[in-house]
Amino acid sequence: MATPTPDAPYGYDPQGRPLSDKNKTTAGLLTLFLGGFGVGRFYTGHTGMALGQLFTCGGCGIWSLIDAIIFFTSNDRTDAQGRVLQG
């Protein structure tokens, strides 16, 4: 693994992409339990998506479940800066 640089303070994944300080599991669990309010998306810095979830279907369990499934099954979840989520 490469040494962290100012551009990638948390290091790199095996493919050489910079890692975020955010955790994929935490984001997924927040999305699962509070996803209709956009909490998981706020956590990863995707405020536009989070506000969309909050104002269009805040509290909707179906939206929470769908978004959590996307979080947990995706191989490349990134934060708002394009860095790969850890975990």
Image (cartoon, rainbow, N blue to C red):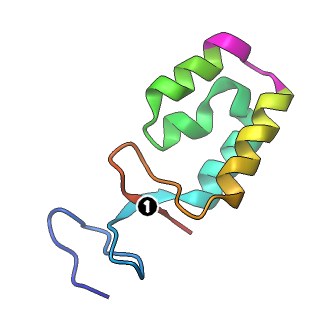
Residue located farthest toward the right when viewing the structure as drawn? 62
Which residue corresponds to the image point at 21% horizontal and 83% vertical from the top-left? 3
Q: Secondary structure at mark 1?
A: strand
Residue 27 vertical placement versus 12 (above, below): above
| Near-viewer residue (14 or 24) | 14
The C terminus - image quarter: bottom right
Q: Which residue is mark 1?
A: 84
Residue 66 vertical placement versus 47 (above, below): below
Q: How far across and down, in percent of the image, does residue 42 sit?
A: 51, 34
Q: How far across and down, in percent of the image, does residue 41 sit?
A: 55, 37
Which residue corresponds to the image point at 69% horizontal and 41% vertical from the top-left? 31
Residue located farthest toward the top when viewing the structure as drawn? 55
The N terminus - image quarter: bottom left
Compared across the picture, whether 48 is left or right of 55 comes to left
Compared across the picture, whether 82 is left or right of 86 comes to left
Compared across the picture, whether 22 is left or right of 30 comes to left
Amino acid type, residue under disc 1 in the picture: Val
Q: Residues within 10 Å of mark 1 (few under 14, many from 20)?
A: many
Residue 38 vertical placement versus 54 (above, below): below
The magenta segment? 55-60
| Near-viewer residue (29 or 73) | 73
Quarter assignment of residue 13: bottom left
Residue 33 vertical placement versus 36 (above, below): below
Q: How far across and down, in percent of the image, does residue 4 sit?
A: 22, 76
Q: How far across and down, in percent of the image, does residue 51 sit?
A: 54, 19
Which residue corresponds to the image point at 62% horizontal and 29% vertical from the top-left? 38
Residue located farthest toward the left when viewing the structure as drawn? 6
Which residue corresponds to the image point at 72% horizontal and 17% vertical from the top-left? 58
